[in-house]
């Protein structure tokens, strides 16, 4: 019995499959060769591992690797940074574990492991495009896009300039996510529904913030898609699949979202993620600096032009992707920032980080635009390659061959870091905000372990507010606060880079040394702009026992404490949450940006404090608005708005007339309040035409002083000596007064399940960051993000928080994925979306 002879179509099909297999094999080989070339060039670049955040991720990878070698597969707690940080809780674990695996393959060499990881990124970001090309029946274009994707300028920028390794790893999964969305919108197949969820879960495990940005971009795309194709139901199903991706990784996500970390306003950093569209689309802007890595992000002119053309001329299948990408690119412009900042949650819209999502949409849409003429397609491919060439210097650097250890060791010697680490017994504090001279990895890992107050990736730190204030104090010259709070954080060594001071005075070095001496620090050495201080009398391991003479309550408590370090800062602004017994222990209570639930109870508390001899100062500019009348009245004192230009008029006080400094040039208009209803005026301003308005005085008691005109903020900006003296008298507090701090020797030991603290006294700040893991432990409490214990031995538990809640979320996500993907398959609607 003879076999059936192949038909012509069958021969043709076998021939085409053979060609496709050959293409896939050849493309894969080319990707591996490209990866080898990239690794070779990076190794000899003389700048690797480049990127502002790269060493942070290398630190995490090395921590994971060393912990696994010691038998601990989840190193949830790292004592070396931020007074103790849960380093895998708030930053996703996929990147550090993959890098740790690379280090293991490299026989424990972290630098070789990093190079291997870069090679994996090259191949791992290429193969998905090859697969997508085959799935969309455009294998040659898919193979080409796979080769180009890693080298797109924005992708190189985020890996080698920003050093955001988790986001770079996301580039391996982003194309697959975008393909599954496009495929599901077309055919509604179960595998694509599941693909959306799984790919999005992987994105979350790479970088949660970036996954959130991808979710927003997906919603924008779905809006555009529905307007173009009128298929709301399938779009909602795709969004559901994406949301299930969050649930699938609930075992990690739940602890991350419910930990209550970082209270720093993300909108403060928002402006750094917008740029003039002219610069973002200028292919030559990258060449305007000889320094590497360059710091000018670039969207890509060919891609943006293609997005605009595709939005106008492509079909309904491809157009939504092009339109969405063009919109994202335009929203990266500085002109769009005020509008986005005004939106709810707008502070999280760091638009330059959306660029790779836009580029991915452009390329997926290009694969869908099958009627694009071949000459135009070839022209785009050529321009895309040419556009990548200027950014390749991020890979090859200077080709000096200098290795990381050589470069970092030299950095240690030039900046006094080596000496600082050698004398540190408990914790090192390095003030260098904005200079980016000393890397956190150098401070902690190079040549041995040294604990430090700072680190990298402040978003994972519960002491983020503390360290932000240290940076602000160093920038603004509040040196007394700086050294006092460094001691509170347990730093026996402080290394100060004087370049961080924004407006240095001629005697700045003497001021630094004097403030250090007042707080117990001694000058050890100087080198250029670096000054090294040490608490030589400190015990090897110590806690801090503190008595504050004053307390500031409200959202602006930080600002007043910088100028008056005797003030204890608070996290809770609600005055009703404080008791008389608690506040009566202080000599001065300052209310600045405070709130209340019950105004009558708040006023009664203030009067009771004043009658007991406590001096209460109320910042009138921050008095809450009454919910019913919308007036701003407290203790019968009404706050009325007033506006000044360039400077205050003469301020009449009981000590004479103050001729104050002008307002800062960027704040020439000063919106503030004056006071009505005072018992005794302590100061007024003459507005002309015989009009006087009070800006300071007492009400209810001689011990209750109201201060208007936002004088405390004005003084912090201008350092006006006359206003400073006036405020000091009003507060009954000297700016040079310090809290009483006693260093108490304690014993600390770190175990896999707990930190054991032994203290000889009650109410001792251990200088360890407080975590919600410690909630409920008897005698343990949170004091401005630091852990306070009583005498005896205390065990601070370490473990995996919210474990069962996270497992429940993941199980729920898996069950919902099975149920909804099955329903989606059965409920498929006709494919009528494409022209």
Image (spheres, rainbow, N blue to C red):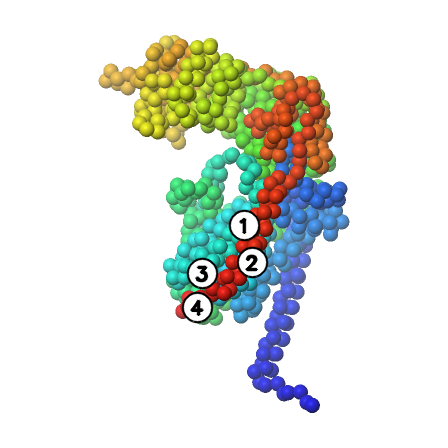
**Label ID, residue 754:** none
Lateral position of residue 446 relative to residue 13, left or right: right
Q: Secondary structure at mark 2?
A: helix
| Figure check: 751 above or below 721 | below
Q: Earlier in the sequence, mark 1 or mark 3?
A: 3
Q: Secondary structure at mark 1?
A: helix
The span from disc 4 to disc 3 (Cα, nearest Å) is 10 Å
Q: Secondary structure at mark 3?
A: helix
- Residue at image mark 4: 830
The span from disc 1 to disc 3 (Cα, nearest Å) is 19 Å
Please indicate, yes or no, whether residue 370 appears anywhere in the rendered image.
yes
- Residue at image mark 3: 234
Which one is in front, 207 or 531? 207
Dots 4, 2 in contact, CB < 8 A: no
Dots 4, 1 in contact, CB < 8 A: no
The span from disc 1 to disc 2 (Cα, nearest Å) is 15 Å
Lateral position of residue 447 relative to residue 90, left or right: right
The span from disc 4 to disc 1 (Cα, nearest Å) is 29 Å
Which one is in front, 449 or 402? 449
**Label ID, residue 246:** 1
Dots 1, 2 in contact, CB < 8 A: no
Mark 3 or 2, which is nearer the eye?
2
Q: Residue at x 35, y 29 (%)?
A: 627
| Figure check: 612 above or below 775 | above
Q: Residue at x 48, y 17 (%)?
A: 580
- Residue at image mark 2: 818
Mark 4 or 2, which is nearer the eye?
2
Residue 722 x %, y %: 42, 15
The span from disc 3 to disc 2 (Cα, nearest Å) is 17 Å
Lateral position of residue 769 relative to residue 749, left or right: left
- The crowding category of the residue bearing disc 4, from other C-alpha atoms within 10 Å (few below 14, some 14 to 19, many at least 20), is few
Q: Name which quarter of the figure residue 648 lies in.
A: top left
């Amino acid at each position: 019995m003879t076999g059936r002879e192949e038909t012509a179509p069958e021969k043709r099909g076998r021939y085409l499959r053979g060609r496709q297999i050959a293409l896939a094999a050849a493309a894969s080989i080319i990707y591996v060769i490209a990866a080898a070339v990239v690794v070779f060039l990076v190794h000899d670049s003389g700048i690797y591992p480049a990127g502002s955040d790269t060493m942070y991720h290398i630190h995490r990878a090395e921590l994971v690797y060393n912990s696994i070698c010691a038998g601990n597969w989840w190193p949830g707690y790292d004592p070396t940074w931020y007074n103790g940080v849960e380093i895998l809780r708030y930053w996703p674990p996929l990147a550090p574990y993959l890098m740790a695996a690379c280090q293991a393959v490299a026989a424990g060499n972290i630098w070789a492991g990093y190079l291997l990881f870069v090679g994996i990124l090259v191949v791992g970001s290429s193969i998905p495009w090859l697969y997508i090309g085959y799935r969309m029946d455009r294998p040659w274009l898919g193979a080409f896009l796979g080769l180009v994707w890693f080298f797109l300028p924005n992708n190189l920028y985020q890996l080698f300039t920003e050093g955001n390794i988790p986001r770079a790893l996301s580039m391996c999964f982003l194309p697959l996510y975008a393909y599954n969305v496009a495929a599901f919108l077309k055919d509604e197949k179960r595998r694509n529904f599941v693909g959306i969820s799984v790919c999005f879960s992987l994105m979350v495990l790479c970088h949660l913030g970036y996954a959130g940005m991808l979710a927003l971009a997906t919603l924008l795309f779905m809006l555009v898609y529905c307007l173009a194709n009128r298929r709301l139901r399938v779009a909602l199903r795709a969004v559901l699949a994406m949301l299930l991706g969050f649930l699938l990784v609930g075992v990690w996500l739940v602890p991350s979202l419910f930990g209550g970390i970082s209270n720093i306003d993300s909108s403060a950093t928002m402006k750094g993620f917008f740029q003039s569209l002219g610069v973002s689309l200028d292919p030559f802007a990258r060449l305007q600096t000889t320094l590497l890595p360059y710091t000018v992000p670039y969207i890509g002119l060919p891609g943006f032009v293609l997005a605009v053309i595709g939005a106008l001329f492509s079909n309904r299948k491809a157009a939504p992707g092009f339109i969405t990408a063009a919109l994202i690119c335009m929203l990266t412009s500085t002109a769009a920032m005020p509008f986005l900042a005004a939106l709810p949650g707008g502070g999280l819209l760091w638009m330059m980080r959306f660029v790779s999502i836009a580029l991915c949409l452009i390329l997926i849409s290009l694969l869908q635009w099958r009627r694009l003429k071949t000459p135009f397609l070839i022209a785009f491919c050529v321009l895309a390659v040419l556009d990548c060439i200027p950014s390749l210097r991020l890979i090859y650097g200077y080709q000096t061959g200098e290795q990381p250890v050589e470069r970092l060791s030299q950095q240690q010697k030039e900046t006094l870091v080596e000496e600082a680490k050698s004398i540190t017994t408990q914790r090192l504090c390095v003030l260098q905000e904005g200079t980016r001279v000393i890397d956190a990895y150098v401070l902690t890992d190079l040549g041995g372990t040294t604990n430090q107050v700072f680190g990298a990736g402040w978003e994972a730190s519960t002491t983020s507010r503390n360290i932000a204030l240290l940076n602000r104090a160093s920038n603004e010259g509040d040196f007394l606060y700086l050294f006092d709070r460094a001691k509170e954080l347990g730093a026996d060594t402080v290394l100060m880079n004087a370049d961080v001071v924004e407006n240095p005075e001629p005697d700045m070095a003497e001021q630094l040394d004097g403030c250090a001496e007042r707080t117990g620090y001694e000058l050890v050495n100087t080198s250029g702009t670096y000054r090294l201080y040490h608490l030589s009398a400190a015990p090897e391991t110590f806690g801090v026992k503190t008595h504050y003479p004053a307390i500031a309550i409200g959202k602006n408590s930080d600002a007043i404490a910088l100028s008056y370090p005797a003030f204890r800062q608070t996290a809770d602004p609600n005055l009703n949450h404080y008791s008389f017994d608690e506040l009566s222990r202080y000599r001065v209570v300052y209310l600045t940006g405070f709130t209340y639930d019950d105004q009558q109870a708040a006023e009664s508390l203030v009067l009771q404090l004043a009658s007991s001899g406590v001096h209460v100062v109320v910042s009138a500019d921050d008095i809450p608005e009454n919910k019913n009348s919308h007036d701003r009245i407290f203790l019968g004192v009404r706050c009325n708005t007033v506006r000044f230009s360039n400077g205050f008029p003469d301020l009449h006080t009981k000590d004479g007339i103050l001729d104050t400094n002008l307002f800062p040039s960027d704040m020439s208009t000063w919106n503030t309040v004056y006071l009505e209803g005072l018992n005794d005026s302590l100061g007024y301003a003459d507005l002309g035409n015989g009009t006087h308005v009070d800006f300071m005085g007492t009400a209810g008691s001689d011990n209750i002083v109201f201060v208007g005109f936002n004088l405390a903020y004005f003084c912090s900006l201008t350092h006006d000596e006359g206003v400073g003296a006036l405020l000091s008298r009003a507060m009954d507090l000297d700016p040079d007064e310090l809290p009483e701090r006693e260093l108490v020797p304690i014993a600390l030991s770190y175990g896999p399940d707990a930190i054991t603290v032994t203290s000889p006294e009650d109410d001792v700040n251990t200088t360890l960051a407080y975590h919600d893991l410690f909630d409920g432990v008897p005698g343990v409490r949170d004091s401005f993000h630091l852990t306070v214990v009583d005498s005896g031995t205390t065990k601070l538990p370490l473990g995996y928080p919210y474990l069962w809640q996270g497992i429940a979320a993941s199980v729920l996500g898996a069950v919902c994925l099975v149920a909804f993907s099955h329903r989606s398959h059965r409920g498929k609607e006709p494919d009528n979306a494409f022209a």
